[in-house]
Amino acid sequence: MRIDIISIFPEYLSALDISLIGKARTDGLLDIRVHDLRDFTFDRHRTVDDTPYGGGAGMVMKPEPWALAIEHILEEVDSRPRLLVPTPSGAVFSQGHAQRLSQDDHLIFACGRYEGIDERFFEWATNVCDVELVSLGDYVLNGGEVAALAMIEAVGRLVPGVVGNPDSLVEESHSDGLLEYPVYTKPSQWRGAQVPEILLSGDHGKIAAWRHEQQLMRTQQRRPDLLS
């Protein structure tokens, strides 16, 4: 999978060099490329924003640098990529999104800042990309980089070979619509707290039933909206 990220703070994406995503890059499973949006400007100040038409606070990102950055990326590929734009006004990102996107060959993340990107850019981009506006949740961040990091990790870990044991992806929270059951490790007794006896029984059928019951209880307590 190829992932391109466009940002005015490319150093923000250095976290992609570590942990499993960094190893996947080294192993060639993920081809991640970070682009500085200011490289696609032509004035000495490398300007990427201007005041909004109609007035109001803040600045709006100009469409031309974004279009040039996309065109630069498209010169290197033959397929039609998916353009993901992290924004509070987008659809809320979910595990289902991550699973679907992990099947794509090429993703581009446009990490906006300030009051957002000129709307005309999105209209133009639909001619060359499949555009999706996505949000981490109902809150506002300073820019799209944090959201892009989270989404890339959520998607990248589902690419075959990135996570060493693929079975560990099956029983995670949201993989089946429920939250994950509680987990324990050695020692069996710690500071007066005991591991549930069922997990020490060796009866895998009863353990599976207990874990499913725990999933239902935890989901009811923490995320009852998921049970529907």
Image (cartoon, rainbow, N blue to C red):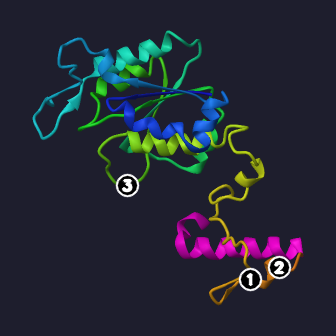
Relative to 129, does residue 182 appear above or below in the rendering?
A: below
Nearer to us of marks 3 and 2 is 2
- Residue 89: quarter of image: top left
The residue labelled by disc 3 is 138
Judge from the rendering whether residue 23 lies leftward or rightward of residue 211; answer left or right: left
Q: Element under label 3?
A: loop
Nearer to us of marks 3 and 1 is 1
What residue type is disc 3 on?
Asp
Query: Residue 175: horizontal and vertical position, in percent?
Result: 67, 55
Assess whether mark 1 and mark 2 are in contact (beta carbons under 8 angstroms).
yes
Residue bounds of the magenta highlight: 203-228
Query: Residue 32: horizontal and vertical position, in percent?
Result: 54, 28
The residue labelled by disc 1 is 196
Q: Main secondary structure of the magenta part?
A: helix
User: Any magenta on residue 211?
Assistant: yes
What residue type is disc 1 on?
Pro
User: Any magenta on residue 97?
Assistant: no
The residue labelled by disc 2 is 200
